[in-house]
Amino acid sequence: MKKSIFLLMAFAFIAMFASCSSNKEPERKFVRNPVDDMIRDMNSEQNFSIILYDMDEQNKKYRHKYQIIVEKSATASLDNEPKILRGSMNTGLLAQASQESNSVENAAENIANREAEAAISDTLEATGPAEVKLEETMTDWKEVSEDFFYENIDNMGMEVASKIDGKVSKVPSPPGYNKYVGNEKYGQWRTNSSGGSFWHFYGQYMFMSTMFNMMSPVSRGGYQDYNRNYRGKQAYYGKDAAGKSKYGTNSAATKKKNPDFYKRRQSNKSLTQSAAKSYQTKRASSAPKSSSTRSSSGTRKTTRSSSRSGSSSRSRGGGGGGK
């Protein structure tokens, strides 16, 4: 009799355990964070930028492609000093930025671009040979975890990691904002006839505008907002004249730079913000409550863990230099 009761209890326990196990979320595959690997591999570099260039999902496999920009010192001879003429500052880029658009949402942005173009029509002189050059590399596709993929769903075209003068940051920001924009070694703020102030690279550093995909000029007000309220704290996407994101996945600049992504997103809902929100909601509901302990001094302690986040290369530098 006792043996029968014992067997019944054992079967009941096994059945209960099996039921609990079937309701558990499937164990997720561990995927190394490629951003952390790249930071480690570039340990000897003092200044670099890692930009999320593209992302994709196929059969629950998540992938990123990155643009890596590394600063190197440049040695320029006097023969290579820039010859910048009046009003010659990046006219191609500004012409592109100020193209007419039939879209109502871009009308105000076009006006701002034309004002910025007018603001730089006066003299811009070169200040000597370029002191730095930027080497650009595009990675192959790299697998990332589902968590990391959706954490960065809004960050395509953004700098997702950087190292500035030996200090690493992994707070997403517009490319170039952390070191080059606002730095008088590379350019200056200039005011147009309407009172608007915009950033302009010196001629020998004008290549940075293209490399960092600055389709429209950087306003001083927007940069000050970033510098005061976002730098090193949280992602900054800015606002264009229509009130939409100026940087990141949903910006006009990124859409123009990488149209293939948006074609894929039309047929793959895993690449959308709604998919990210659905995933994050699911993760939050299935995650166990975080356990915390209270120290003798009455402060709460919570255990936290953080993820560590062949190719063609080219170097770009100006023909001459910074202030």
Image (spheres, rainbow, N blue to C red):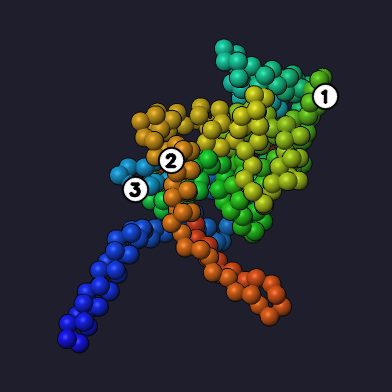
Asked whether 179 or 206 is in front, the reply is: 179
Q: Foreground mark, 2 or 3? A: 2
Label 1: how many Cα within 10 Å (few below 14, some 14–19, many 20+): few
288 up-or-down from 55: above or below? below
Name the mark on residue 61: 3
Q: Amino acid at mark 1?
A: Gly
Q: Is residue 3 above or below residue 58?
A: below
How far is the residue under mark 2 from the one under mark 3? 14 Å
User: Which element carries disc 2, helix, strand or loop?
Assistant: helix
**Distance between the alpha carbons at the discs numbered 1 and 2:** 42 Å
Number of the label disc, if any, that sits on residue 275: 2
Could you tell me if the residues under marks 2 and 3 are in contact, i.e. CB atoms within 8 Å? no
Q: Which residue is mark 1?
A: 195
Q: Residue at x 67, y 25 (%)?
A: 241
- Find numbered disc 1 in the image and state the secondary structure of the residue it sits on: loop
Neighbor class of circle 2 (other Cα within 10 Å; few <14, some 14-19, many 20+) is some
Mark 3 is surrounded, within 10 Å at the Cα level, by few (under 14), some (14 to 19) or many (20 or more) other residues, namely few
- Left or right: 131, with 29 as reference point: right
Q: Quadrant of residue 30?
A: bottom left
Q: Residue at 39% x, 58% y: name it.
A: 31
- Quarter that holds the C terminus: top right
Looking at the picture, which amino acid does disc 2 mark? Ala
Q: Position of residue 247 (x, y in %)?
A: 59, 35
In the rendered image, the vertical position of residue 103 relative to residue 171, given as above or below: above
Where residue 291 appears, as percent x and y from the top left, is 54, 69
- Numbered label attached to residue 89: none
Residues under labels 1 and 3: Cα distance? 50 Å
* Local secondary structure at mark 3: strand
Residue shown at the point (76%, 27%) measured from the top left: 124
